[in-house]
Image: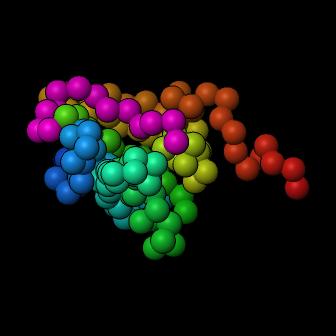
Amino acid sequence: MTDKELLLKAIEARAFAYAPYSNHKVGAALVGKSGKIYTGCNVENAAYTPTNCAERTAIFKAVSKGEREFTAIAIVGGLGDNLSELCAPCGVCRQVLSEFCDGDLRIILGTPEKITVTTLSNILPYSFGKSDLAK
């Protein structure tokens, strides 16, 4: 699957976003090592902290299906119908991605007109993970 095709899957997932408070709708499409694609959208809550981001929705969906390793994630987002700006994962999503992904995870940020590719280690340097915990 090309980066553009994966980005289109994220755009499709974004259509299901529940964002009545911020109107910031996000979609994500995550590729497992198996080749399966798991999509997610953000789901807001009036109490704010129970809100779940699109990236974590996709990861939790994949993990609940038994997938534990991933190769790429595409993310799109913006206010209302606007998809003109890149939308990077929040800090919490970066930390959750680091639980299941190596630093070379491909992160595809895009709009219908523009695609930028980076890696997890680039957007989360000096990450805290399993190896930092005492055994």
Q: Which residue is drawn at 81% across and 48% down?
A: 133
Please state the horizontal and vertical placement of residue 64, each as a whole percent of the image: 48, 71
Question: Which of 2/21 is in front?
Answer: 21
Answer yes or no: is residue 26 visible: yes
Q: Which residue is drawn at 55% across and 48% down?
A: 96
Determine the image quadrant of residue 31. Answer: bottom left
Give how far across and how far down residue 20 sits, in percent. 21, 48
Magenta span: predominant SS is: loop
Question: Of 4 and 13, which appears nearest the observer?
Answer: 13
The x, y position of residue 100, in whole percent, is 58, 53
- Going by the image, does 85 lie left or right of 58? left
Question: Residue lying furthest left in this view?
Answer: 81
Q: What is the count of numbered marks?
A: 0
22, above or below 100, in the image: above
Residue at x-position 61% and y-position 51% = 99
Closer to the camera in the image, 15 or 106 = 15
The C terminus lies in quadrant = bottom right
29 to the left or right of 91: left
State the extent of the magenta-drawn residues as a range. Answer: 80-92
Q: Does the magenta stretch include residue 89?
A: yes
Q: In this view, does 122 lie to the left or right of 79?
A: right
Q: Position of residue 78 (x, y in %)?
A: 22, 34
Quarter occupied by residue 77: top left
